[in-house]
């Protein structure tokens, strides 16, 4: 139950809706391919490629892409992330090249927007004469004729042409000469290795092309509708059939529908039928049948063909926009990091790109500036806005020695920061990686839906053909259904001939079926949920954890650093008769200031937090295993144990003795204070409970979840902490290696419904053993990597938010699957019975996908905060 199930899922779009390249670019050209292949171990011939497939918009699409790739001899593993429109392919480089992968995806009906590999190089050419799309198209065409070209990107405004290519098949000189032969002068050539970064503009380009395609289809279709109304209800229009045929032709066959038909053809020839097959079969036959009207009087279906295609394009555009909103969290994360950093090198300030930062570089961050990367403050003090990491808007005070997170904001004060992590090792990179994992993962409940959608389109085609045959043969037997429907459905015509009724029923079945609604049910909810979590410092890395969370009945908490702060703090000050509390505390803090012991420093910090002035100690002396002594303002002060005061023949009064015993029973470390050989009072320190622990545990109880605490402390100390916060079960005296066994014991009692929260390296095995492992983000990286969920801020209230978010996300997944199934199970039979006009059907189909996405977006209304 613990492995992260990788997905063949994502949230995407087709390069230009169905794979066509934008205007002025060759149809099979991938605008900015983004694929990285790195040589691996398997037989020294393993490669990893990343393909950006904008049209891969649902789990259904991802399954078709995967099926197409897996047919290639040499493909080992295919993983996809529809949120990023990215397909990762592990393959044998001795059997396959990157172009083979691209062709396989395109045969499946999807264009590849970006592709690149370990052996790929990047070339940027400056072409001053490239001033229009026409020029860019000519250059692209010239380059496309070369072998080994992976990707071509043109930027008219900057006069740049970026080419990703295989240096074994092509060279920079050949590429430059191809541009020159196209009639354009090359001003400069810049070489560089192709990057694996996702093209941030890919989705925007796709959306813009979808918008242009929609308008291209909408204008003629609107004219067709305006002509159809008077033709049907008032006055026949001379030459009506010819006019609508001419208006609908570009909608169905040219820029409006060509990409759909091309995608459908590729998909059919590849035996991976997609949604476009249904749309093509629902629009082409009506148009072609309508042309019979020129030689034989009959009902025109041309208007229907144009309307179906236009509403399909409208649905694709709206769906793409809505999915963009669902996946906006990861896009925001990608733009959060600083682009440059000011570093001190050779005593001089130097501005360098983030990619050139090195560990141990000292960065200069001015007030209001963004901290470039993770580091440690070596000079200066300030408040830092860490809201991007923790979700908390209150800036955190930072000074020398404190760690800071890259991409957070320095509010005031000049800081010098030593870089400790750069590149892919930074906190932000880790967050992005975790969110990508979540958005690319599957929820186990989705597996059945995936199996069904893989056979969905062929099944719908069979039902449509069966409907056609049944209506032709049994029209009179079915006519009572039309008579009944005509009573309340204005589009039902019971007088239709068997042929007309068969055509309408067949087309209606084809266009109303919606595998996309099923394919979007899970990924859109996970996209929204994981994005919400990232914004609040709750990182859920697997869809499996989301589903498992709903059944959790026991949460195991490590005590130190999880329930408690994990560091000692001053808890009690008591003065004996004749002394003041502040006097006792100042005297104890002054002497303890000479010690480096954590308990001593806790007393000093406690005194300073009360705004007390701590004078310097003189004649400081450490008394081994007993305490410390020194002169404070001319008086001798001793701070230590009962043994120390006994050796000094200092008697304790009854009150001090009683309180000392009580504090020790609570697990606190109490130290007696003597001034001038007289018992003056005591101070106590302990690992204090986090402020939100009690309210968080109470919130877990309200959700029906029991809480256990595991600790290496003795039973007495553990019970005291447990009573303070409301723990149900205490497992005390557990050594680090015994935590795994403790989890197993609880699993034997509660079944596979146990979650573990920990922050240390020694917690990692227990986090793996638990059904859901939850790491406190402030802890060790090892624990974070072992966990399914990471709480960045390290407060237990975030655990409650994680549980609530997971439950809400899973509930949305169930709702989406329910409505998608109900829609298809109800709509297809209704259409087959002839009760649904195809024009109404295509609108319903569009609405079903948008409903699933809209329902997922409602997840943002979920209240996650814990009332304290």
Image (cartoon, rainbow, N blue to C red):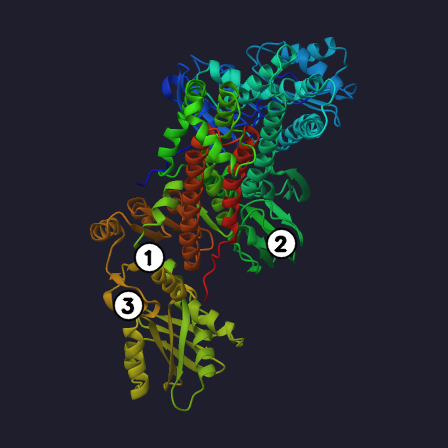
Distance from the alpha carbon under mark 1 to that under mark 2: 34 Å
Provide the secondary structure element on which disc 3 rests: helix
Question: For residue 689, what is the image quadrant?
Answer: bottom left
Question: For residue 470, what is the image quadrant?
Answer: top left
Judging by the rendered image, the residue that carries numbered circle 2 is: 410
Q: Is 402 positioned to the left or the right of 695 in the image? A: right
Badge number at residue 717: 3
- Earlier sequence position, callout 2 versus callout 3: 2
Q: Is 130 positioned to the left or the right of 80 in the image? A: right
Distance from the alpha carbon under mark 2 to that under mark 3: 40 Å
Residue 585: image location, x then y, percent: 45, 78
Residue 749: image location, x then y, percent: 21, 53
Q: Taking 594 as reference, is 788 above or below it? A: above
Q: Nearer the viewer, residue 272 or 200?
A: 272
Q: Is 376 positioned to the left or the right of 585 in the image? A: right
Provide the secondary structure element on which disc 2 rests: strand
Disc 3: CA contacts within 10 A as few (<14), some (14-19) or many (>=20): some
Residue 431: image location, x then y, percent: 49, 43
Q: Nearer the viewer, mark 1 or mark 3?
A: 1
Residue at screen point 65% across, 58% down = 412
Say whether residue 544 is visible: yes
* Quarter placement of the C terminus: bottom left
Residue at screen point 24% across, 64% down = 714
Disc 2: CA contacts within 10 A as few (<14), some (14-19) or many (>=20): many
- Earlier sequence position, callout 1 versus callout 2: 2
Judging by the rendered image, the residue that carries numbered circle 1 is: 557
Q: Taking 817 as reference, is 302 above or below it? A: above
């Amino acid at each position: 139950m613990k492995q992260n199930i990788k997905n063949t899922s994502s949230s995407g779009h087709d390069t230009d809706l169905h794979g066509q390249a934008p205007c002025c670019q060759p149809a099979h050209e991938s605008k900015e391919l983004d694929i990285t292949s790195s040589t691996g171990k398997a037989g020294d011939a393993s490669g990893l490629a990343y393909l950006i497939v904008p049209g891969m918009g649902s789990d259904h699409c991802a399954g078709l892409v995967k099926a197409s790739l897996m047919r290639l001899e040499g493909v080992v593993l295919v993983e996809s992330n529809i949120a990023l429109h990215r397909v990762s392919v592990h393959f044998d480089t001795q059997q396959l090249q990157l172009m083979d992968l691209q062709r396989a995806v395109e045969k499946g009906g999807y264009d590849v927007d970006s592709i690149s590999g370990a052996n790929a190089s990047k070339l940027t050419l400056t072409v001053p004469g490239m001033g229009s799309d026409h020029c860019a198209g000519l250059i692209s065409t010239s380059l496309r004729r070369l072998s080994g070209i992976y990707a071509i990107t043109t930027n008219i405004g900057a006069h740049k042409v970026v080419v990703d290519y295989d240096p074994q098949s092509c060279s920079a000189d050949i590429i430059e000469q191809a541009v020159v032969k196209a009639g354009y002068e090359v001003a400069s050539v810049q070489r560089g290795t192709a990057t694996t970064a996702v093209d941030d503009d890919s989705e925007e380009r796709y959306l813009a092309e979808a918008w242009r395609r929609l308008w291209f289809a909408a204008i003629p279709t609107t004219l067709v509708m305006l002509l159809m109304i008077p033709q049907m209800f008032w006055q026949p229009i001379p030459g009506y059939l010819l006019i609508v045929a001419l208006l609908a032709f570009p909608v169905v066959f040219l820029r409006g529908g060509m990409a759909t038909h091309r995608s459908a053809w590729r998909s059919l020839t590849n035996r991976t039928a997609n949604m476009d097959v249904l749309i093509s079969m629902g629009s082409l036959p009506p148009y072609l049948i309508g042309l019979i009207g020129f030689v034989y009087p009959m009902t025109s279906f041309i208007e229907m063909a144009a309307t179906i295609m236009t509403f399909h394009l409208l649905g694709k555009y709206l769906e793409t926009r809505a999915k963009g909103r669902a996946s906006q969290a990861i896009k925001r994360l990608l733009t959060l990091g600083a682009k440059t950093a000011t570093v001190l090198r050779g005593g001089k300030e130097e501005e360098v790109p983030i990619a050139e930062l090195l560990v141990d570089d000292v960065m200069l961050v001015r007030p209001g500036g963004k901290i470039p990367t993770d580091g440690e403050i070596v000079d200066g003090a300030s408040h830092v806005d860490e809201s991007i990491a923790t979700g908390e808007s209150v800036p955190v005070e930072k000074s020398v020695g404190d760690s800071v997170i890259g991409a957070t904001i320095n509010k005031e004060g000049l800081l010098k920061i030593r870089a400790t992590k750069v590149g892919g090792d930074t906190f932000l990179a880790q967050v992005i990686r975790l969110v990508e994992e979540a958005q690319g993962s599957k929820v186990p409940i989705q597996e059945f839906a995936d199996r069904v959608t893989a056979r969905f389109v062929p099944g719908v085609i069979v039902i449509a053909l069966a409907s056609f045959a049944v209506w032709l043969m049994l029209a009179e037997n079915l006519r009572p259904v039309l008579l009944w429907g005509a009573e309340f459905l204005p589009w039902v015509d019971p007088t239709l001939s068997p042929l007309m009724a068969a055509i309408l029923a067949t087309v209606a079945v084809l266009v109303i079926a919606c595998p996309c609604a099923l394919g979007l049910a899970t990924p859109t909810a996970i996209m929204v949920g994981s994005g919400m979590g990232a914004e609040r410092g709750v990182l859920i890395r697997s869809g499996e954890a989301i589903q498992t969370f709903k059944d959790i009945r026991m949460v195991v908490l490590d005590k130190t650093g999880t329930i408690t702060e994990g560091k000692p703090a001053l808890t009690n000050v008591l003065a004996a008769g004749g002394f003041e509390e502040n006097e006792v505390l100042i005297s104890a803090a002054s002497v303890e200031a000479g010690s480096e012991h954590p308990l001593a420093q806790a007393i000093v910090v406690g005194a300073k937090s009360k705004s007390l002035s701590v004078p310097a100690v003189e004649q400081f002396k450490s008394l081994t295993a007993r305490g410390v002594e020194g002169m404070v303002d001319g008086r001798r002060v001793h701070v230590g144990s009962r043994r120390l005061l006994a050796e000094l023949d200092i008697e304790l009064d009854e009150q001090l003795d009683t309180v000392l015993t009580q504090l020790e029973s609570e697990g606190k470390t109490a130290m007696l204070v003597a001034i001038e050989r007289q018992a003056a009072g005591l101070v106590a320190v302990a690992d204090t409970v986090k402020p939100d622990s009690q309210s968080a545990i109470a919130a877990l109880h309200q959700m029906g979840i029991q809480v256990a605490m595991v600790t290496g402390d003795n039973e007495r100390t553990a019970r005291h902490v447990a009573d303070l916060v409301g723990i149900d079960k205490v497992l005390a005296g557990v050594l680090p290696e015994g935590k795994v066994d403790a989890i197993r014991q609880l699993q034997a009692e509660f079944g596979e419904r146990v979650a573990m929260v920990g922050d240390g390296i020694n917690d990692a095995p227990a986090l793996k053993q638990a059904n859901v492992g939850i790491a406190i983000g402030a802890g060790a990286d090892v624990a974070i990597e072992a966990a399914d969920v990471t709480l960045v801020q390290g407060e237990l209230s975030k655990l409650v938010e994680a549980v609530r978010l997971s439950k809400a996300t899973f509930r949305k997944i169930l709702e989406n699957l329910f409505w998608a199934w109900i829609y298809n199970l109800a709509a297809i039979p209704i259409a087959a019975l002839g009760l649904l006009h195809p024009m109404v059907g295509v609108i319903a189909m569009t609405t079903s996908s948008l409903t699933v996405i809209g329902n997922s977006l409602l997840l943002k209304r979920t209240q996650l905060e814990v009332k304290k």
